[in-house]
Image (spheres, grey):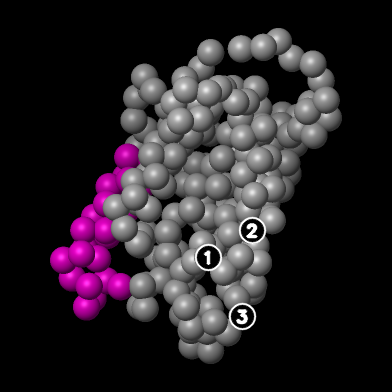
């Protein structure tokens, strides 16, 4: 079984993204008057009325609290190292920002005119999850470090949860998460169509596989 992330050497893009996110998070705590969600978070109303399009990128580097950034960076490390090793740094960064920005656009359209900022790298992180499930659908992901579940099932379950939670007013940007996953799915289906990646993704759910 492949234990996702563990034992793999840190790759350049993943390392630099983690360092950048941690640096911004420290800046949020030390200099909140300069680095804050109102200015650099994704505010739909501001993007539409004031054309603050930079927020579609900067929102990915801000986080609400320690656990928010910890889990996002943990998943970035866990899935990103393998994907960057497969694609190369340039392609990995292009995919990361593509899914993150698309997640932001989805959030702006869904919350059209809202003055409430959205922050966090989760849109891009969900994009990485979709990519991992397409490239390595049968790799086990250890839920709570104990229970193995195939990557394709894990991604599908999270995708369904985000879809069903879209109308929840729980302070979580479910549409951004879903937007990152959907953008990643279609990008990979097109970009790697000659590789056959994702061609039989849904059909494979009905194929019998050996147990772990």
Image quadrant where residue 155 sits: top right
The correct choice, above or below, for 161 with respect to 40 in the image is above
* SS category of the residue bearing label 1: loop
* SS category of the residue bearing label 3: loop
Residue plotted at (61% across, 80% down):
112
Residue plotted at (65% across, 62% down):
166
Q: Nearer the viewer, mark 2 or mark 3?
A: 2
Q: Which mark is residue 170?
A: 1
Q: Nearer the viewer, mark 3 or mark 1?
A: 1
Q: Which mark is residue 58?
A: none
Q: Which residue is mark 2?
A: 165
Report, in whole angstroms, how far the alpha carbon at label 2 lies from the one at label 3: 18 Å
Q: Which region shows up in magenta?
A: 13-36
Question: Sequence-wise, which precedes: disc 1 or disc 2?
Answer: 2
Residue plotted at (73% across, 44% down):
190
Which x, y percent locates residue 99?
57, 53
Which x, y percent locates residue 69?
35, 51
* SS category of the residue bearing label 2: loop
Instruction: Note whether residue 138 is visible.
Output: yes
Report, in whole angstroms, how far the alpha carbon at label 3 lies from the one at label 1: 17 Å
Question: Sequence-wise, which precedes: disc 3 or disc 1?
Answer: 3
The correct choice, above or below, for 108 with respect to 143 in the image is below
The correct choice, above or below, for 156 with respect to 47 in the image is above
Q: Quadrant of the C terminus?
A: top right
* Residues marked 1 and 2 touching at CB (< 8 Å): yes
Count up the numbered dots: 3
Magenta stretch, main secondary structure class? helix
Q: Which residue is mark 3?
A: 112
Question: Sequence-wise, which precedes: disc 2 or disc 3?
Answer: 3
């Amino acid at each position: 079984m492949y234990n996702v992330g563990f034992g793999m050497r840190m790759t350049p893009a993943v390392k630099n993204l983690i360092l950048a996110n941690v640096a911004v998070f420290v800046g949020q705590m030390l200099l909140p008057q300069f680095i804050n969600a109102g200015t650099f978070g994704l505010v739909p109303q501001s993007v539409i009325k004031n054309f603050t399009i930079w927020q579609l990128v900067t929102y990915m580097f801000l986080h609400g609290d320690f656990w928010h950034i910890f889990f996002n960076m943990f998943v970035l490390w866990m899935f990103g190292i393998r994907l960057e090793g497969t694609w190369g740094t340039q392609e990995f960064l292009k995919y990361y920002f593509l899914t993150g920005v698309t997640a932001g656009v989805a959030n702006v359209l869904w919350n059209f005119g809202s003055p409430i900022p959205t922050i966090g790298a989760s849109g891009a992180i969900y994009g990485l999850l979709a990519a991992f499930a397409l490239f390595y659908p049968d790799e086990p992901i250890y839920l709570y470090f104990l229970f193995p579940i195939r990557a394709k099932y894990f991604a599908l379950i999270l995708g369904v949860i985000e879809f069903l939670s879209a109308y929840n007013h729980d302070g979580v940007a479910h549409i951004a998460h879903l937007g990152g996953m959907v953008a990643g799915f279609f990008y990979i289906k097109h970009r790697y169509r000659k590789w056959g990646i994702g061609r039989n993704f849904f059909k494979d759910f009905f194929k019998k596989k050996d147990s772990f």
